Amino acid sequence: LKGDEGMKGEFATRVCGSADLFKHNGRSPCHSINFITAHDGFTLRDLVSYNGKHNECNGEDSGDDHNNSWNCGAEGPTGDGGINHLRERQMRNFLVALLLSAGTPMLVFGDEYGRSQRGCNNGWCQDALSWFSWSDMAKEESKLVRFTRVLISMRKQYMHMFGRDGFVSEKDIWWRVHWDDPYNYVCYVLHDHKASKGYSGLLFAFNAGHEFRDCDLPEGKTWYRLIDTNLPSPKDVCEDESEATKINSKSYGMHPYSCIVLRCMADKAEAFDHSGSEAAYSQLQETAEHLKEVVRRRASMELLPNLEPEQIRAGELMKRLSSMSGLPLNLMAAIDEEKPMDVDFGDIIIERAPSSTLLPLTMSSVRLPGLKEID
């Protein structure tokens, strides 16, 4: 995706599930763990922002420098709008290739919002650089975070195409590639065999070079744009396929270092609305905010004359948050005054989990009077 020549065949093999590595011994595409970055090495943001490691903060020359990265024209942060736009496109290109391909995707925490370690590819002793920044994520909520969230929803919707049991074969894919051309332009169509009405398929095109390219569209079919990484948010990805832009020409113009995903569907009734994932996410966010509110508030009779409804609501919200996040909540009716506690807000008491001494507060044990214990 960064434009190295002679990589089209390798790229095609990987997005199809890496049959060369797993098919010979009876394994399936799910055994192919696909990843762009890992906990050792550059983050996704740094992969498109640095050519070499910057580990001076470690006080040692640690870490390999085989990053296979490209800074897009400047080393580290820059005020150049063109370079920054190219970096945004590249991050989205990588995410499309990762999440919309056969195999099991692995996404490093923070890559969904563009976390940076300032070029440090061996942050073993850098707590502040390695932490997840909720404030930085909030800044990308309507941009890269949203893009990633919709991609995950697309993967779930078309799991029969990406989470497949067998490897991609000629009956599943139509390659529209000039393999002998050294320029890294790749186009292919994945056929949706589970479409209920007429033909349905997804067209992918990656323009991994400095040239403007026209993507010739298969004739006799109507195509709608789901993704164009060159477009600014929120046009870069379509949440509701019923509102996707129809392509009225025989080709689609692609900017350098961009990718597109188009869908052909015979019936708009088969369009999927990915904003449902947005609604579930918003509900989770609302629950978390309410819990913070409950924790901060002193549950005095002056502020809450009737505590019982508030206790019940808080308990239900905590149970819902626990089921969505997998975080165990332990709600107990009795209060053990002899047990050490970190924070006491009147009748609402939160204690620090023994295994979480590095965290300021956890919800591992939340006690509210009048509530039964919940496993």
Image: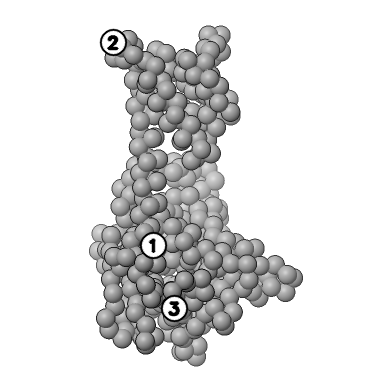
- Residue 254 falls in which quadrant of the image? bottom left
Residue under label 1, please give it: 272
Between 271 and 23, the residue placed more toward the observer is 271
Residue 71, visible in the rendered structure:
no
The image's mark for residue 302 is 2
Q: Which mark is residue 342?
A: none
Tell me the SS state at disc 2. loop
Q: Residue at x 38, y 76 (%)?
A: 266
What is the three-letter code of the residue carrying label 2?
Glu
> Which labelled disc corresponds to residue 199?
3
* Quadrant containing the N terminus in the rendered view: bottom left
Residue 14 image point, x, y percent: 56, 72
Mark 3 neighbour density, 10 Å: few (under 14) some (14–19) many (20 or more): some
Q: Quadrant of residue 17?
A: bottom right
Give amino acid for label 3.
Tyr
Separation of residues labelled 2 and 1 (CA atoms): 49 Å
